[in-house]
């Protein structure tokens, strides 16, 4: 993240070091990871971000740096701990409910995909030789991180730490080792097939994390099962609240999942969530059943959203046309597509 900010500002490592009043090896150490940027004092970090922005990096550089440090803390904690238990009071995965921006940064070394929130960062510096296109982890580091997540997920259930467990399970979906897929299937059989009481938000989210993680590995039947069993007003409200928080419509950071049971959803608008979901309806999307279900529930709860957003209506209509002609949708999916197309027609009147 620091390198992206520097390159977008058109600065070499030497020039940035000069602006910051540090040695060039310090900047090199920050960017290579030899000197953790997280070890820099808060005041100094603010100065680094401010100097980058004044030099031409986006004004959002400071915010992205802070999120990158939070993501780095998750990775470094897991790699260092391996199969050791860490007290939840000190574990970053138990501290706050993560949004997609931080999760995108945590998973960047595994997917190789530049997080969408960093699209405004464009390098203005010529490359010097071969450069890694994304953060890299040694295979041993990757294995230690994911082994730690399994260990934490197994123990946190007994320790009464549902947030730590479900966020660990979700991240395990980015591990491609066969024994991890087996573990996730066992997790789904444990939490995904039991009947959930109407007010069991924890059970709902555990089942959600297991099905989403398995879908990320290519096993999509479980997310179909989860969506098919997600019924009842409380479950629908919890799902919408989760999505609103995930994409940033809820401003305040949450330290547990209790907010998802709040039946008064007026604290978030829904426009950003509508646009987000409308852009994730590709027939091959691994989480399509959940995305489609959530979009259908959102439009049913707030039909005025479509009328106020003609651009989203246009792109959504195109996506729904593609889905309608795709033969892989379930009967429920086809019904949801038909309902959304009808809502589009009404909203355009």
Image (cartoon, rainbow, N blue to C red):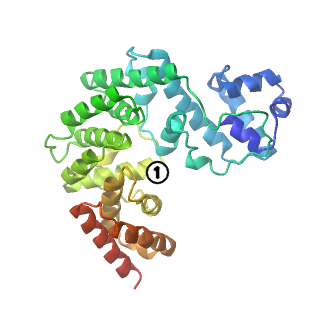
Q: Relative to residue 253, is residue 13 depicted above or below? A: above
Give x and y (percent) for residue 205: 29, 41
| In this picture, residue 81 sits left or right of residue 200 | right
Q: Residues within 10 Å of mark 1 (few under 14, many from 20)?
A: some
Give x and y (percent) for residue 237: 28, 54
Residue at 51 percent across and 23 percent down: it is 139
Residue at 38 percent across and 28 percent down: it is 177
Residue at 29 percent across and 38 percent down: it is 210
Image-quadrant location for residue 150: top left
| In this picture, residue 23 sits left or right of residue 346 | right
User: Viewer-proximal residue, 114 or 271?
Assistant: 114
Image-quadrant location for residue 303: bottom left
Image-quadrant location for residue 165: top left
Give x and y (percent) for residue 121: 68, 47
Which residue is label 1 attached to?
247
Residue at 62 percent across and 25 percent down: it is 38
Residue at the limit of the structure toward the bottom, as seen here: 349
| In this picture, residue 133 sits left or right of residue 217 | right
Secondary structure at numbered mark 1: loop
Give x and y (percent) for residue 49: 71, 38
């Amino acid at each position: 993240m620091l390198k992206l900010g520097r390159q977008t500002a058109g600065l070499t490592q030497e020039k940035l070091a000069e602006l910051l009043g540090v040695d060039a090896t310090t900047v090199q150490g920050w960017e290579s990871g030899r000197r953790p940027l997280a070890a820099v004092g808060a005041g100094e970090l603010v100065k680094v971000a401010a100097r980058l922005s004044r030099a031409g990096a986006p004004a959002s550089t400071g915010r992205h740096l802070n999120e990158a440090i939070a993501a780095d803390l998750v990775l470094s904690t897991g790699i260092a701990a391996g199969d050791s238990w860490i007290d939840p009071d000190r574990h970053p995965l138990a501290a706050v409910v993560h949004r997609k921006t931080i999760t995108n940064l945590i998973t960047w070394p595994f997917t190789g995909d530049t997080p969408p929130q960093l699209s405004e960062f464009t390098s203005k510096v010529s490359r010097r030789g071969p450069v890694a296109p994304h953060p890299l982890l040694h295979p041993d580091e990757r294995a230690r991180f994911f082994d730690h997540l399994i260990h934490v997920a197994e123990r946190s259930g007994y320790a009464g730490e549902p947030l730590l467990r479900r966020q660990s399970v979700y991240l395990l979906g980015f591990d491609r080792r066969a024994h991890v897929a087996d573990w996730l299937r066992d997790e789904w059989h444990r939490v995904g097939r039991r009947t959930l009481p109407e007010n069991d938000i924890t059970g709902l989210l555990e089942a959600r994390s297991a099905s989403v993680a398995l879908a990320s590995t290519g096993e999509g039947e479980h997310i179909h099962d989860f969506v098919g069993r997600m019924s009842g007003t409380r479950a629908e409200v919890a799902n919408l609240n989760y999505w609103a928080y995930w994409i940033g419509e809820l401003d305040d950071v949450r330290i547990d999942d209790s907010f998802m049971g709040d039946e008064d959803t007026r604290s978030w608008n829904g426009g950003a969530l509508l646009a987000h979901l409308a852009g994730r309806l590709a027939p091959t999307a691994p989480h399509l059943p959940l995305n489609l279900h959530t979009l259908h529930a959102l439009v049913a709860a707030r039909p005025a959203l479509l009328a106020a957003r003609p651009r989203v209506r246009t792109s959504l209509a195109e996506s729904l046309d593609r889905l309608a002609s795709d033969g892989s949708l379930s009967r429920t999916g086809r019904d949801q597509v038909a309902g959304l197309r009808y809502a589009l027609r009404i909203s355009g009147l």
